[in-house]
Structure formats: C-alpha cells, structure tokens
C-alpha cells in the first residue's frame, strides 16, 4: 500500500461521514402520536416539528446530475400510520391523472414496506407523485401474487400535497414540494396479516424518490440497494422501522428547535466540490466558513442575514490539499462544527 493510500485511509477512519455509502442497515424510530394530526402538507407544524427526519442519500445507476434533497418523517397512533415527505427539487413534473397511473414517471416519492419484521412475507408499495396521484399495490415478492389495492380502500387514505395535480410543462426552477398522508391499518389488514405497531415492534421498509421522465432522471433510496441499475423492488434491502412510545411527542404542542442546525456536507469525502446543508430556526445573522485542521480560516462562504429555513451552500476545494477540513456555522455565541474530507 503506497503512502497516499495509507494517508487517505487514515483520514476516512477519523472523520464522521453521515452520507456514507455504507450498506449498513438503517433504523428509523417511528414516534407514537398522542393525538390525531391534520393532513394538510405542512412540514413544520406540530407534531412533525418535534420528530426527526430521515434522508434519502443513496442512488442506483450512475450518480445523478440532479440530486434532490429528500426528507421523510413517519409517525403512528392506534389507528393509522402517518407519512410526510419534503423534497427540495428541480425539473418537477406530474402527468399521471388517475389512481394506479404511472406516477413513477413523474416527480414521485415512494414508501415500500412490510408490516412485519420479515420482508419475505411480502410488501406494499405506495407511490405518490408531487400532484397527489397514487399507485398502491401489494405483492408477496417482486412481481409475484401482485394485488392492486382497490380504489374503494385507497379512498380511505387521507392525502395532501402542495403542488397542483398536473404539472406540465416541467418546472425547471428549484422547487420545494411536500406530500403527506394518513393510512389506516384496517386497509392493510385486508391484504396482509399485519403486525400492529406497539412500542418495540419492527417493520421493514424503504423510502424512494424517482422521476423517470424528467429532464434529469434519478433513483434515490433511504436504505442502500446494492444493484447497478434502478430497481426499487428489492425487499431484501429494506431498512428497519422501529416503533417507539409517545413520551416525547404531543401533536398539539410545538417545541422550539435549536436555533442552528449544521447537517454537514454531501458528498463526504469530496473531490473537489461538495454541498453544505444547514438550517435556521429563526432569522438571524450567521457566518459559514471553512477552516483547516489547525483552525485557520480557509474561506468564508457566507456572512450576513438569513431568514428562517433550510440552506445549501456549495464549496469548491480546487487548489486545496487532500486532508481534513472543518465547516463552521456561527450565530453569536453559538458555534457548530462538522468535519469533511477532501480526497484528490
């Protein structure tokens, strides 16, 4: 092993890499609600603003030129499971008009799940485009004993979405869209003997984002699918949904989040470009900078006033040496720091 290889390996061992392509099985804790939630496609309402989001960081095929930022949250009560997606997208399109239409061709998010800890028993795939059109079916294994969910059952699901039903022509500008739904367990029991959620129960699942026929097609997943081409129907790669209790979630109350959140950068390691993500809970003056491992300022990326919201900042490390760098977000006396690795 040459010196450069040894050095790079050492860097990878010491840095935290939240966006790693590791095939490790992801686990998401599903929060139990104390009260029903109004389904209206509002991302930051209670209780969602107290619940942690998962992020879709993996892809199949070649890395897409357009890589949307996709978040999802899941919760449950005694009667139903609740899901909400937020997509920071571009090249947005929705053409499917009818239930069981080809929504995967559009800007689409998908919830594939087995209501049990054993994905070999079969799975549901609930696919919804940005305009609220849905494709919903169950199958015992990919393409085997496939049953499309009756429209009468689908009508029992409450859905909401922020985009119009038809989006055509394609929206090429950066666009944020949200979909949300409440799915009663009674519907699922018609097609599968579900393990009803209680604290400690686990289901298997994956969350997907696709847009087969937009200008920049992409196929993203939460749990990594080890396959060279797009193929979402791989239940053997499902991650774990672990149902928790409701001790920390009250759907009628809003908890004030931390004033700053530095989510890190993607990709990490990078060469030479990466994107840094951060969030502000309120409007304020902030400074975002990149420093070397000794604390010396390499570059100031932003210094000024920002309103409340999510932000992305591009960083180009061309001209810098391979090594560990620190990205630092500052707001008055509050300082958040993440490590990132430049590998050339």
Image (cartoon, rainbow, N blue to C red):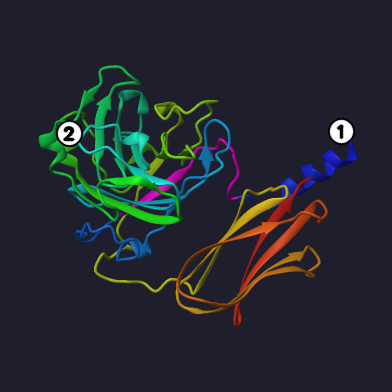
Residue at 58%, 33% (x, y): give it.
Answer: 62
What is the C-alpha distance between the residues marked 2 and 1? 56 Å
Q: Which residues are magenta?
A: 18-31
Query: Residue 264 is drawn in which quadrant?
Result: bottom right
The answer to whether residue 195 of the structure is visible from this angle is no
The majority secondary structure of the magenta stretch comes to loop
Is residue 29 inside the magenta stretch?
A: yes
**Residue 127 in the image: x percent, y percent?**
31, 37
6 or 195, which lies in front? 6
Circle 1 crowding by C-alpha within 10 Å: few under 14, some 14–19, many from 20: few
Residue 259 screen position, x and y as percent: 49, 74
Residue for badge 1: 1
Q: Magenta segment: does it hold 102?
A: no
Residue furthest out toward the right: 3
Identify the residue at horizontal 19%, vertical 50% (top origin).
Answer: 78
- Between 60 and 224, the residue placed more toward the observer is 60
Say if 229 sits above or below 15 in the image. above
Residue 71: give x, y in percent of width and height: 42, 52
Report the disc number at residue 189: 2
| Residue 152 to residue 339: above or below | above
Dot placed on the residue nearer the N-terminal end, 2 or 1: 1
* Residue 291 shows in the view: yes
């Amino acid at each position: 092993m040459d010196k450069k290889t040894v050095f790079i390996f050492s860097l990878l061992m010491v840095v935290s890499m939240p966006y790693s392509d590791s095939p490790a099985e992801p686990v998401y804790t599903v929060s139990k609600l104390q009260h029903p939630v109004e389904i209206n496609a509002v991302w930051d309402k209670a209780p969602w603003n107290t619940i942690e989001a998962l992020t879709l960081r993996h892809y199949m095929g070649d890395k897409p030129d357009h890589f949307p930022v996709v978040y999802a949250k899941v919760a449950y009560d005694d009667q139903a499971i609740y899901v909400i997606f937020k997509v920071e997208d571009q090249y947005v399109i929705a053409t499917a008009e009818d239930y069981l239409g080809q929504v995967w061709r559009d800007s689409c998010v998908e919830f594939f799940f087995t209501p049990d800890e054993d994905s070999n028993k079969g799975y549901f795939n609930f696919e919804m485009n940005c305009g609220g059109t849905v494709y919903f079916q169950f199958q015992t294994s990919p393409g085997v004993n496939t049953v499309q969910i009756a429209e009468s059952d689908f009508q029992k699901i409450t859905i909401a979405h922020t985009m119009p039903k038809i989006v055509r022509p394609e929206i090429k500008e950066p666009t944020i869209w949200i979909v949300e739904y409440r799915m009663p367990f009674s519907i699922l029991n018609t097609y599968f003997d579900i393990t009803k959620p209680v604290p400690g129960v686990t289901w298997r699942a994956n969350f997907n984002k696709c847009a087969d026929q937009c200008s920049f097609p992409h196929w993203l997943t939460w749990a990594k699918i080890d396959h060279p081409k797009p193929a979402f129907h791989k239940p053997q790669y499902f991650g774990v949904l672990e149902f928790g209790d409701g001790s920390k979630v009250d759907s009628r109350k809003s908890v004030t989040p931390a004033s700053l959140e530095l989510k890190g950068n993607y990709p990490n390691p990078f060469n030479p470009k990466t994107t840094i993500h951060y969030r502000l809970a309120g409007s304020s003056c902030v400074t975002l900078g990149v420093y070397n491992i000794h604390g010396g300022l390499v570059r100031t990326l932003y210094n000024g006033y920002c309103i409340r919201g999510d932000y992305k900042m591009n960083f180009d490390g061309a001209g810098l040496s391979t090594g560990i760098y620190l990205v630092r977000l500052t707001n008055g006396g509050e300082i958040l720091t993440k490590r990132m690795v430049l590998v050339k």
